[in-house]
Image (tube, grey):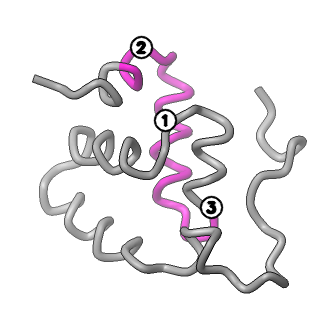
Amino acid sequence: MPKAPVKRFRRLPDDKQSRIIEMAWEDRTPFEAIETLFGLAEPDVIEVMRHQLKPASFRLWRKRVTGRTTKHQALRSPGVVRGYCPTQYKQ
């Protein structure tokens, strides 16, 4: 039985589902940007990816993003200003 974040994700239009997965795969898009745009916090994104990806793909993705400074705004250098830009992701 899918958890609440996965159910919320499945209610989104296909293009938004695709965009969430794309943003999660991107190395330089922080989880905070996904949360700002779609309301899915990092644990929610992890749960969605667990259900959407094949097991081997999920393991590779988790290995890549775990501890990656570019995926976690709090770990980034203060000089890096990438992330959420109101005009970057058009709704």
- The residue that label 3 is drawn on is 29
Q: SS at mark 2?
A: helix
Q: SS at mark 3?
A: loop
Of labels 3 and 1, the one closer to you? 3
Look at the magenta stretch and give its main secondary structure.
Answer: helix
Magenta residues? Answer: 8-29
Furthest residue toward front: 74
Of labels 1 and 2, the one closer to you? 2
Tell me what residue is drawn at x 40 percent, y 20 percent: 8
Tell me what residue is drawn at x 87 percent, y 42 percent: 86
Vertical side of 63 occupied by 8: above or below: above
- Estimate the x, y position of residue 40 in percent, counting from the top left: 49, 37
- The residue that label 1 is drawn on is 18
Vertical side of 32 occupied by 20: above or below: above
Q: How crowded is mark 2: few (under 14 residues within 10 Å), some or many (20 or more)?
A: few
Identify residue type, mark 1. Ser
Task: Name the image quarter holding residue 45.
Answer: top left
Vertical side of 20 occupied by 2: above or below: above
Tell me what residue is drawn at x 23 percent, y 58 percent: 58
- The residue that label 2 is drawn on is 11
Identify residue type, mark 2. Arg
Mark before the other along the chain sequence, 1 or 2 = 2
Residues at marks 2 and 3, CA–CA distance in whole angstroms: 23 Å
Query: Is 16 included in the stretch rendered in magenta?
Result: yes
Identify residue type, mark 3. Thr
Residues at marks 1 and 2, CA–CA distance in whole angstroms: 13 Å
